[in-house]
Amino acid sequence: MNYFSVNDVDDPNKWIDEALALKNELELKGPKSKTGKSICLLFFNSSLRTRLSMQKAAFNLGVESFVFNVGSDGWQLEFGDGTMMNGNTSEHIIEAAGVLSSYFDAIGVRAFPSLTSREDDYSEKILSQFIKHCSIPVINMESATLHPLQSFADVITIKELFPSKKPKVVVSWAPHPKALPQAVTNSFMQWAGKMDYDLVITHPKGYELAPEFMANATLEYDQDKALANADIVYVKNWSSYKDYGRILSQDESWTITNAKMNLTNNGKFMHCLPVRRNVIVADEVLDSESSVVIHQAGNRVTAANLVIQKLIG
Amino acid sequence: MNYFSVNDVDDPNKWIDEALALKNELELKGPKSKTGKSICLLFFNSSLRTRLSMQKAAFNLGVESFVFNVGSDGWQLEFGDGTMMNGNTSEHIIEAAGVLSSYFDAIGVRAFPSLTSREDDYSEKILSQFIKHCSIPVINMESATLHPLQSFADVITIKELFPSKKPKVVVSWAPHPKALPQAVTNSFMQWAGKMDYDLVITHPKGYELAPEFMANATLEYDQDKALANADIVYVKNWSSYKDYGRILSQDESWTITNAKMNLTNNGKFMHCLPVRRNVIVADEVLDSESSVVIHQAGNRVTAANLVIQKLIG
Amino acid sequence: MNYFSVNDVDDPNKWIDEALALKNELELKGPKSKTGKSICLLFFNSSLRTRLSMQKAAFNLGVESFVFNVGSDGWQLEFGDGTMMNGNTSEHIIEAAGVLSSYFDAIGVRAFPSLTSREDDYSEKILSQFIKHCSIPVINMESATLHPLQSFADVITIKELFPSKKPKVVVSWAPHPKALPQAVTNSFMQWAGKMDYDLVITHPKGYELAPEFMANATLEYDQDKALANADIVYVKNWSSYKDYGRILSQDESWTITNAKMNLTNNGKFMHCLPVRRNVIVADEVLDSESSVVIHQAGNRVTAANLVIQKLIG
């Protein structure tokens, strides 16, 4: 079993309940005793929450974690089939995956998209090769198109905020100076599609997600209309899928301010972090009671706890 | 409670006794069993002793340590209030501190000064923001102006060398090819001021410390006069505070040699390390019985043991 | 006691048996309980297998491991005697070794050769200084001229494949786009010399090893003749020892293909990894039953287990 996307999860709502029960148990009893199991966390890209929440979750479960920064610690990996490796890559994924599989009980991989080739990125060139060549469970720590540890933390957080009500959840694009992946949004949409939400997505024209990630969501190009009566405002920047990897807008009128939040039903502000203050969202929102971003980030550990336990616990 | 400076320590002399007792206990009984607690060690700058002694001390106390290199592992942090973050910084200290506080029981931070803005450095721009925004204890692993883990190790070492005598302790500047912070010297002066020392500082004109760090020390511009009858020769280079961050002298006559040590009362040579041989101090001194630098570096663990125990043990 | 080369091993064949017994025991019973011991793994160069197998082995034995990347984490080290350190190096090996010796129970060091000065490299400038100045056991995690953890894993693997037969072991050079050290081959030859092998080495003229590493091996310049009837084909590229550090040939006819393997006695293909596919060896060989490279890499943990246990277990 791998944890690549929500499709690897038999019953997402049951997982939420189990994650919250495990969170509660760990808070009461502290970390579990050592299991003798170990996990390798492989980073092709920077990370703060993913790295530290995975290490913390492994520690919580008595699993030893070993961090490996591919770029600085190891060898440049080759992912092509049949390549004559006389260039810059020193080691093929086939060998790397084989060796890691013989050392550890599971592996986590973070590998961002290139944002230059939509085909490469949306075929999940890197993660799919790890999954293909590893004989141990592979955990997606944010791939080219998905970030399921984040999304699981997100739906856990929404469940804590609205244990019984069917919330109106609005996913809103916001401006950002750099071209960012669609992974966080895609993945949240996948999970949200399994939840009992009234789901709306809003963004400037040209920022439409790949159709397979639209689930049962309503698309509304007018942000103000979308925000009306929202319980959750889930904000994220992403670059264009259609005009792949490009920034089509930096429209500051999409920045989330108190005025925007006032359109909602006393809504809560969510963001996966890191967040650029006063670009994505105004200080006045982040520093207010309506922001739940730290609580949400705390649930990255809650999500990771259950994923590691399900795979090797 | 934080460990930012000696001012966070209720009774520095009692802490020395407790640190030595704990050192003794650990040597006899080995590391303590796991506490379930964890600490994150955040490095903005290079480190050997601080990094490894903190990890070792955490291990000694049954506390799990997680190292995070801000530059290479994570996101560039923003420290400004109200900044519109459309430049190079991706994450604000407010969020980083909030998230780390929700994952760990304490945090250590190393952040060197710029040596370009005395105002920024002496306001402890970085450490003070961590302290402000973290809800867990913050340990200063060398900040812009202070290095209290080093200083605590230093006074522990002097106590071991002179358990009963009031020693003459001479802090001497020595030349160095690069501009270095004042942190180690400032911090040692703060701690030394709480001890029963005959404290003398000697340096070329222009290297006066900020007045608040002079404590009850005597300033003597003539190094040879200062060294007369010294029990401890504590050597360190620093750049100018007045002419901020500048190198005003590389005068080789300040290098510590056997001839200099012969002026002392069979004095012991101390330095925080890393030390540039034959620039700061001659091989003949470092390789002699009078050097206690390795013993002193060993006490970095002794100091860290107690600090971690006091904060989260 | 150190682990610098096979010369530190009293009875290499007995070590193989002990390593296999320990492997078996760990597979049955899982990792040993915590010993309170700790080891520091110091990397001057990249690593995947060495780094992770040493960490895994330490974990298996209840020894805490601390990884330190010299280049990015710490200070540039000075190895010269009597140097006036007013250049780029900040810390002398004498102090670094002294401090590490006071913090840990053992140290592993990886330091590749320059491939520019044969004298520096073959005098083992870096490892020999660590051994000289450390008061704790030093483990060679690949030095300028030797890689004894790899070689030990290699002979363990061959023992598993041929528990009773005296195998014909052929060490073959293969082409590579970059100049590589002789360390893996030198070291394997040293170990193989202690084994009951029919040992043959084959390479283009100019690639002769330093005479002290030729042991009792037969040198055969014709690769096809060498491969005849081989049980083990141990493949590796190295740069010239005579014309030091230079690439003298990139002759693709030395690449290991099925046609080459067909010359052997149903031989097994071995390589230390990372391996460049379709340069060193064709996909058809690596992806066949005759390749044992993943099993061999798995034995890096087997070898490391015993070395750590022998030194500090």
Image (cartoon, coloured by chain):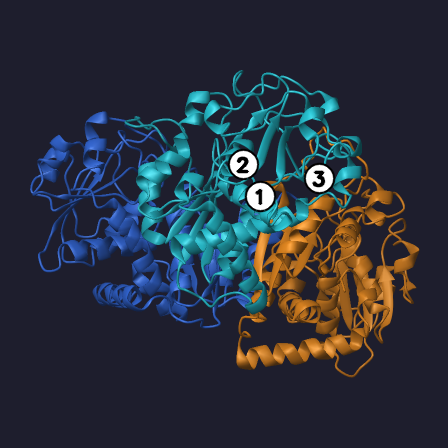
Chain colours: A blue, B cyan, C orange
Q: Nearer the viewer, residue B135 or B145?
A: B145
**What residue did someone put label 1 on?**
B154
Crowd band around label 2 with a 10 angstrom C-alpha radius: few (<14), some (14–19), many (20+): many
Residue drawn at x 69%, y 75% as measured from the top left: C19
* Chain containing mark 2: B
Q: Are marks 1 and 2 in contact (CB under 8 Å)?
A: yes
Is residue C65 shown above or below C289?
above
Q: Secondary structure at mark 1?
A: helix
Query: Is C170 on the left or on the right of A296, as rendered?
Result: right
Q: Is residue C33 above or below residue A142?
A: below
Residue A282 image point, x, y percent:
22, 31
Label whose residue precedes the other's in the sequence (1 or 2) = 1
Q: Do the residues marked 1 and 2 share a common chain?
A: yes
Q: Please tell me which of labels 3 and 1 falls first in the chain.
A: 1
In this rendered view, identify the residue nearer to me: C77 or A100. Answer: C77
- Which amino acid type is marked by label 3? Gly
Looking at the rendered structure, the secondary structure element under dot 3 is loop
Give the secondary structure at mark 2: helix
Q: Is residue C20 above or below residue A16?
A: below
User: Going from the N terminus, do you reach mark 2 or mark 3 first?
Assistant: 2
Which numbered marker is on residue B267? 3
Horizontal and vertical percent for residue C212? 91, 58
What is the three-letter code of the residue carrying label 1? Asp
Q: Amino acid at mark 2?
A: Phe
Residue at 43% across, 50% down: B40
Q: Chain of mark 3?
A: B
**Where does the N terminus of chain C fall, quadrant-wise?**
bottom right
Q: Nearer the viewer, residue B305 or A259?
A: B305
Give the Cα separation between the discs numbered 1 and 2: 8 Å
The residue drawn where x is 55% and y is 34% is B184
